[in-house]
Amino acid sequence: MKLYGMTDSGNCYKPRLVMAMLDIPYEHVETSSRDGTTRRPDYLAKNANGKVPLLELDDGRCIAESNAILLYLAEGTRLLPEERYERALVYQWLFFEQYSHEPHVAVRRSLLKYPERAKLATPERLSETLEGGNRALDVMERQLERSPFLAGAAMSVADISLYAYTHDASGGGFDLSAFPAVSRWLKQVEDDPGYVPMEPRRA
Amino acid sequence: MKLYGMTDSGNCYKPRLVMAMLDIPYEHVETSSRDGTTRRPDYLAKNANGKVPLLELDDGRCIAESNAILLYLAEGTRLLPEERYERALVYQWLFFEQYSHEPHVAVRRSLLKYPERAKLATPERLSETLEGGNRALDVMERQLERSPFLAGAAMSVADISLYAYTHDASGGGFDLSAFPAVSRWLKQVEDDPGYVPMEPRRA
């Protein structure tokens, strides 16, 4: 399998982390959505939506959307429950991540981190994403006060998905000390024997 | 089962349409996110994210997020494939819907439709959502030129999810005549024997 993605993108980190935890071999193909690569015809033929990450199977078939890739990879493993309601809760948190969390927590980080996005970082946009991100972190806090992981007692791809941008939320100006249950949960994910960091640690 | 939702919301229409197609009985509880109901403590106890739709099972357990509800309802039915890759494509389109389609196509409709949102309808916002919505419709068009339904030969919850706001895209100022494959596909969904419209037809 090949994974097209950017090292410093949380969405691209999600499948890398799941494949590390599940010990699935793959080839990483560094592919930037910031230099136009994902808008080139050869890439658009693989993903008409022109985004990363993208998983290419050995037979050439592709799967786009980070959370769809996670569900595909985790099928039949410890990271995705079989039971119908438990599974529905995993789905619930994955859609929460893409609709209520990423557009605030990740977008605010990108507005502050990437020089080419600085002109989009208006006071309204920074205030909107700060408010939306804190609201999302608060929803996670309420759940994590009641269960060890988001969808219950065991870690699932819902945790991996929400870990990706939450663990670096301070890069978007969020204060995680206001969310003690979230902070405890971040450490639990990092305690998994297969855990790998987003960017390789420098020597 | 109880479904909390608003009649004129596309996100709330999705599970109503799936339950009609699958002949699943339920009680509809009209619940508005525009009058503060979804921010009241009794509702927040069911869904900490304070949004509709919400599915409440007979034992009181709840599932939030429209597309998670669709996956839950469709498990084991004709609307969700068993085969792992086909299923992954359904997931892919459901995440595409929430990230790349709804925030443009549905949001532009709400900016134009609801008087209380008029002050948010700035020229920048209207132009951004028009561009993003047309881009999403174009991604759908490319797929629907190649297959009858989004995830392949058969209708799935991916089609129901994307139907919800696409069928009313003209309410957001989108011109569907520029997307002939999308227009053909809308009719195919409406041809399903279990199809019901978003708002009850007036006599």
Image (cartoon, coloured by chain):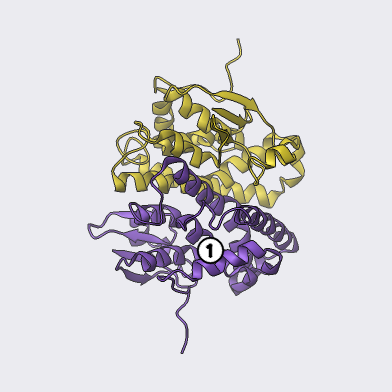
Chain colours: A yellow, B purple
Left or right: residue A106 versus residue B44 is right
Residue B17 location in percent, x, y?
42, 67
Residue at screen point 38% across, 60% down: B54
Q: State how many labels appear.
A: 1
Which residue is at the far top? A203
Image: B77 above or below B91: below
For the question of whether residue B9 can be seen, the reply is: no
Residue B70, quarter of picture = bottom left
Q: Chain of mark 1?
A: B
Residue A6 location in percent, x, y?
64, 30
Residue A108 location in percent, x, y?
63, 42
Which residue is at the far left? B59
For the question of whether residue A17 can be seen, the reply is: yes
Q: Which residue is mark 1?
A: B163
Q: Amino acid at mark 1?
A: Tyr
Q: Nearer the viewer, residue B121 or B68?
A: B68
Q: Nearer the viewer, residue A136 or A189?
A: A189
Residue A165, quarter of picture = top right
Q: Quadrant of the N terminus of chain B?
A: bottom left
Residue at screen point 57% across, 54% down: B147
Q: Nearer the viewer, residue B106 or A58?
A: A58
Q: Secondary structure at mark 1?
A: helix
Q: Residues within 10 Å of mark 1 (few under 14, many from 20)?
A: many
Image: B152 above or below B174: above
Residue at screen point 74% across, 60% down: B127
Left or right: residue A103 versus residue B22 is right
Residue at screen point 47% across, 76% down: B199
